Amino acid sequence: MRYISTRGEAPALGFEDVLLTGLATDGGLYVPESLPHFSLEEIRSWRGLPYAELAYKVMYPFVEDAIPADEFRKMLDETYGVFTHKSVAPLVQLDTNEWVMELFRGPTLAFKDFALQLLGRLLDYVLEKRNQHVVIMGATSGDTGSAAIEGCRRCKHVDIFILHPYQRVSEVQRRQMTTVQGDNIHNIAVKGNFDDCQRMVKDSFGDQSFLGGKTQLAAVNSINWARIMAQIVYYFQASLSLGGPDRSMAFSVPTGNFGDIFAGYLAKKMGLPISQLVIATNRNDILHRFMSGNKYEQHQLEHTLSPSMDIMVSSNFERLLFDLHGRDGAAVKELLENASRGPVSIEDYRWKHARKLFDSDAVDDKATCDTIRETFEQNEYLLDPHTAIGVRAARNCRRDNAVPMITLGTAHPAKFPDAIVESGLTVKPELPAHMADLFEREERYTVLENNLVDVQGFLAKHWKNA
Ligand SMILES: *Cc1c(COP(=O)(O)O)cnc(C)c1O
């Protein structure tokens, strides 16, 4: 399998290089040159497989040039073996034909574990083989950082530096990052917002001279192709559990950077019958505004009760734009260069095509809280604020009540207790047993000014062989 850039100029790469590369050299994102396609018969034959085995079937075509089958199977067994529910991604029923898929049974209680637990293992395997070392530099508004740290804590060939906005992530989220012990783990609290952190990461990738040529940066943010790949699997799992592929499914996906829902779009292109995909955003609704009015325009960042979806631009949306433009990299390049200067639109027929592929909704904090409260009152089931946005959008956008509607449950409610309080409930979400002592564990992190030179200096000084 070859991977090509959405901006059409960078060289095509194999899986190993795509894994180790962040942005393509032309500023684009890597996507597979062509997708594997599975027949209904083949998909049907996967019914009842354990999660790790299904993951093997869905993902192996993407990695087969780089990793022997038995090694990949072993990695998948380890990756999904650490999840605390035997089915890995259990479904919970809210109403007739309405479900939540709980993707928060991994070590850090959010869906990002599905990809990042695997990514750590993939990286170490490839680096060992190449006798190479990398420094992971990432920015997080919360969930990515802890999942990445957890995924890389045992890596021999990786140092990881995670930037989070100082005092802007929840205490649970911060502690999940800062209490993980390991020489190769470094947390930096930047006195700025998430976008400041993200910009520093981007600038550092653009010019890595501060590392003195002795190691290289690798990315774990959602533009890394391997993360998208790992997220395709659970769409198949949910469908197979509810009678697919012999009936089609609808999914509602709490969306920030468009990674998770893009994986659903790929599952559909790979042959899984999906009749509806709902983009569920909070008030940071650039995608909903684009879907409703064909105008792609950055607004100010708003802080909401669903911080993991607080974004101004959705980086993975570029991957969809590439397809919408008939995979014309030059057109995507021009569009996104214009988009960095002001609002842009795409040709009407392309936009109409996007609207056939996706529905969308934006849910504010009040509606989020209402949904948390109503769902608890009706089902005695606690939604986290991100998942609540998905549930609300699913109900607002639903096209066909006969089609099972599955909302991706992206985080455990105990990660975001503020939203539960805000919704007027007195019930307190409990952390699962393996994290019950989180508030007693020792924290380690460094606070730095919102300044690129300081942050780069810290990295240069603290990676393992510096
Ligand atoms: C990261 C995250 C999202 C958004 O996912 P994207 O792939 O960026 O769209 C939604 N909910 C939670 C809890 C997250 O951690």
Image: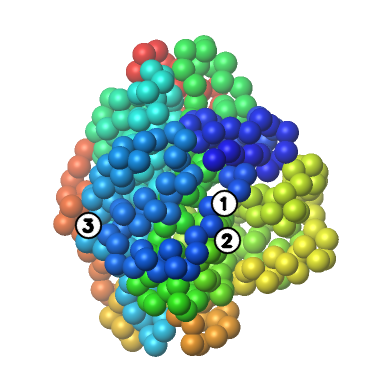
Q: Residue at the front extreme?
A: 41
Residue 296 point in image, percent of width and height = 73, 57
For the point 39% across and 88% down, the residue is: 96
- Image depth: mark 1 or mark 3 in front: 1
In the rendered image, which residue does mark 2 sit on?
269
Colouring style = rainbow
Disc 3 residue type? Answer: Thr
Q: Earlier in the sequence, mark 1 or mark 2?
A: 1
Residue 166 image point, x, y percent:
44, 41
* Res. 387 in view: no
Is label 3 in a helix, a strand or a loop? loop
Mark 2 vs mark 3: give the one in front.
2
- The residue carrying pointer 1 sits among few (fewer than 14), some (14 to 19) or many (20 or more) residues within 10 Å by Cα, namely some
- The amino acid marked with disc number 1 is Leu
Say the numbered circle drawn on residue 84.
3
The secondary element bearing badge 1 is classed as: loop
Mark 1 and mark 2 in contact? Answer it, CB < 8 Å: yes
In this figure, what is the number of numbered marks? 3
Report x, y in % for residue 225. 52, 43
The outermost residue toward the right is: 347
Residue name at image x 61 percent, y 48 percent: 34
Q: Callout 2 environment at 10 Å: few (<14), some (14 to 19), or many (20+)?
A: some
Q: Circle 1 sits on which residue? A: 35
Spatial separation of the CA atoms under disc 1 and disc 3: 31 Å
Say what amino acid the circle numbered 2 marks: Lys
Distance in Å between CA atoms under marks 2 and 3: 30 Å
